[in-house]
Image (cartoon, rainbow, N blue to C red):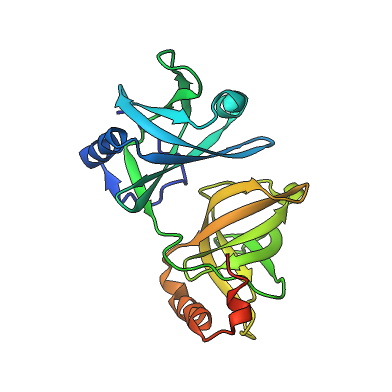
């Protein structure tokens, strides 16, 4: 099976080896839904389809509207696939591997992965806040530098979404691990947590993008995660709850 895991994209495989192939074949038998996040130069798109087959190290995928997305698929430098199966979401990096001639419409191939990661980004409900606060993304390591600054859109115990300007996107891509600095209503102290960028999509406003990030397990940030969970679990008014997505 062709290895399609991209550098920096899967940090620790939850499913690998023969188990990966078995799971993908089961997904094909059930026509499991699959979502794709395409990223490239001046490109960020989301597509939806279903898994049809696994053969010769390639996944056969049918899109809901394939023809109009042909240029996007062929020009994407990175494709993040999200397979929904048995109540779980499996995430892997892959690349476009050609169009199928056996079916009309949007049927094509992706390189099959050798490992999958289970995504639990949405196991906790997201929360929106009345006042917009800023989020700063920094590279990890000694002497961290600022990567981008944006606006916090929603927050959960497992991750966040933020909006940033397109011009600040240089070096920002799915799979990149960053340090996030942000404030949240109800806390006088800022939060600093390690997070992995899982998606970069178009925002409703021009020249802006929406980033989805999931927090990663970091022993140095356990107390901060506990403080964030306590804040999010605190009782709230009905009007505040109506703001949640």
Residue at coordinates 62% horizontally, 64% vertically from top-left?
A: 143
| Quadrant showing the C terminus | bottom right
Q: In this view, does 135 lie above or below 148?
A: below
Q: Is residue 203 left or right of residue 200?
A: right
Q: Is residue 141 above or below residue 185?
A: above
Looking at the image, can residue 147 be seen? no
Q: In this view, does 138 lie to the left or right of 52?
A: right
Task: Please state the total of marks drawn on the protein image.
Answer: 0
Tell me which corner region of the image, top left, top right, bottom left or bottom right, holds residue 211.
bottom right
> Residue 13 at x, y = what percent?
33, 49
Tell me which corner region of the image, top left, top right, bottom left or bottom right, holds residue 128.
bottom right
Residue at coordinates 31% horizontally, 33% vertically from top-left?
A: 28
> Residue 17 at x, y = what percent?
24, 39
Say which of 241 and 158 sits in front: 241
> Residue 1 at x, y = what percent?
29, 28
Looking at the image, can residue 62 be seen? yes
Say which of 76 and 136 sits in front: 76
> Residue 123 at x, y = what percent?
41, 64
Q: In this view, does 197 lie above or below 58?
A: below
Residue at coordinates 71% horizontally, 61% vertically from top-left?
A: 149
Residue situated furthest right in the rendering: 206
Residue at coordinates 35% horizontally, 39% vertically from top-left?
A: 32
Residue situated furthest top in the rendering: 101
Say which of 158 and 234 sits in front: 234
Q: Is residue 219 above or below residue 76?
A: below
């Amino acid at each position: 099976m062709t290895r399609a895991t991209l550098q920096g994209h899967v940090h620790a495989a939850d499913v690998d080896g023969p188990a990966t192939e078995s799971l993908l074949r089961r997904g094909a038998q059930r026509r499991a839904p699959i979502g794709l996040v395409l990223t490239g130069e001046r490109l960020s798109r989301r597509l939806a389809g279903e898994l049809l087959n696994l053969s010769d190290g390639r996944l056969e995928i049918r899109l809901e509207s394939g023809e109009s997305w042909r240029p996007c698929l062929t020009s994407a430098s990175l494709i993040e696939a999200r397979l929904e199966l048995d109540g779980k979401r499996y995430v892997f990096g892959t690349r476009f591997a050609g169009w199928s001639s056996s079916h009309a419409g949007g049927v094509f191939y992706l390189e099959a992965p050798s490992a999958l990661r289970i995504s639990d980004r949405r196991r906790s409900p997201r929360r929106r806040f009345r006042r917009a606060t800023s989020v700063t993304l920094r590279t990890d390591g000694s002497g961290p530098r600022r990567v981008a600054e944006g606006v916090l859109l929603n927050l959960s115990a497992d991750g966040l979404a933020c909006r940033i300007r397109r011009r600040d996107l240089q070096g920002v891509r799915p799979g990149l691990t960053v340090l996030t600095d942000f404030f949240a209503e109800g806390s006088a102290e800022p939060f600093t947590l390690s997070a992995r960028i899982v998606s970069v999509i178009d925002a409703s406003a021009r020249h802006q993008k929406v980033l989805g990030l999931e927090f990663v397990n970091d022993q140095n940030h356990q107390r901060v995660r506990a403080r964030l969970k306590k804040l999010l679990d605190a009782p709230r008014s009905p009007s505040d709850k109506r703001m949640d997505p």
